[in-house]
Image: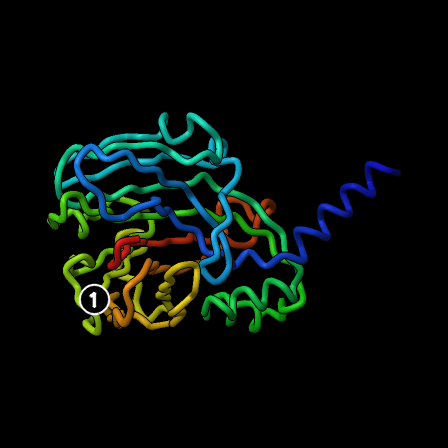
Amino acid sequence: MKKNAVFIFIFVLMSSVVIAHEFWIAPDKYKLTSNELFSFNCYVGEDYKPEVWGKRRDRTLIAERFHLNCRDDITVDFNNKDSVPVMMKLTEKGNHLITLRSKPSYIELTGKSFEAYIKEDGMTNIIQYRKENNLQEKRSREFYRRYAKSLLMVDGVTDSTYKLNTGMLLEIIPQKNPYAIKINETLPVYFEFKSKPLKNYQVRAWCKKNGKLLIKNSYTTNDKGFANIPIEYKGEWMISLVKMELYTADVSKADYESFWGSFTFANSDE
């Protein structure tokens, strides 16, 4: 009896929580000098309020560092201490990308919570599917994966690292170097899913400074997968989106599969 009660409690808890939490990588400093020791970690949270992403060792598929034509697997260092900030030094001047791909995780939500989640993130394909099949009140079973990038700058030097396609299923690729964009200029960004442009899809831009949220705006990509993001403030920026599809690998295990992407940088001294 006690065992069943625990199971029911866990299920209700999971079903009542909407997983519309952003996921991102952030260093303690985005602008560094050569060989300067810094730390970074993975975070989840609503409204860009960070909570450390737990169970990193179990959830991480691969973590990498990119600089121009160099690509380093840093998964071992990344997972050496679970949830603890990762310490690193960058010896080459210029831009560096730190990326993470997660393993699939599973969650179930009540119909009400799931409907709120997909509406919040503009997943019109799933909204329409559930409406057409009278599924709005049905609980959801979902696998979700994380894809995150963070762009750093060393010794005040910019280069083409920012626009690398890292081969992830979900790619967010600025078309100009974020560290060369001035206030009130526009940052064009390309969004790609499974090697194809993500057309007419909702994406988001966030900006915070000193813990205060300054921007939380939604934009829609055009028919070529591009969106223009106005850079109106100095601070820590995140560009993000969630893409969802029907899960077809084994319908007995899940109904949907989602892919969460983020790209962070800072145009201030944070």
Looking at the image, residue 117 sits to the left or right of residue 29; the answer is: right
Q: Quadrant of residue 39?
A: top left
Q: Position of residue 179 (x, y in %)?
A: 18, 57
Q: Secondary structure at mark 1?
A: strand
Q: How many marks?
A: 1
Q: Nearer the viewer, residue 213 or 144?
A: 213
Q: With respect to residue 213, does 72 lie above or below? A: above
Neighbor class of circle 1 (other Cα within 10 Å; few <14, some 14-19, many 20+) is some
Q: Quadrant of residue 34?
A: top left
Q: Position of residue 12 (x, y in %)?
A: 73, 53
Q: With respect to residue 212, does 89 lie above or below? A: above
Residue under the image location 76 percent in, 47 percent down: 9
- Residue position marked by numbered label 1 in the rendering: 188
Q: With respect to residue 267, does 65 lie above or below? A: above
Q: With respect to residue 116, does 79 lie above or below? A: above
Looking at the image, residue 68 sits to the left or right of residue 226; the answer is: left
Q: Nearer the viewer, residue 218 or 223?
A: 218
Residue under the image location 20 percent in, 66 percent down: 188
User: Can you name the residue that lies furthest to the right here?
Assistant: 1
Q: Say which amino acid is labelled 1.
A: Pro
* Quadrant of image for the N terminus: top right
Residue under the image location 17 percent in, 32 percent down: 91
Residue under the image location 37 percent in, 64 percent down: 206
Q: Position of residue 115 (x, y in %)?
A: 58, 67
Looking at the image, residue 241 sits to the left or right of residue 191; the answer is: right
Structure colour scheme: rainbow
Q: Position of residue 54 (x, y in %)?
A: 52, 39
Q: Nearer the viewer, residue 164 or 177?
A: 177
Q: Quadrant of residue 18?
A: bottom right
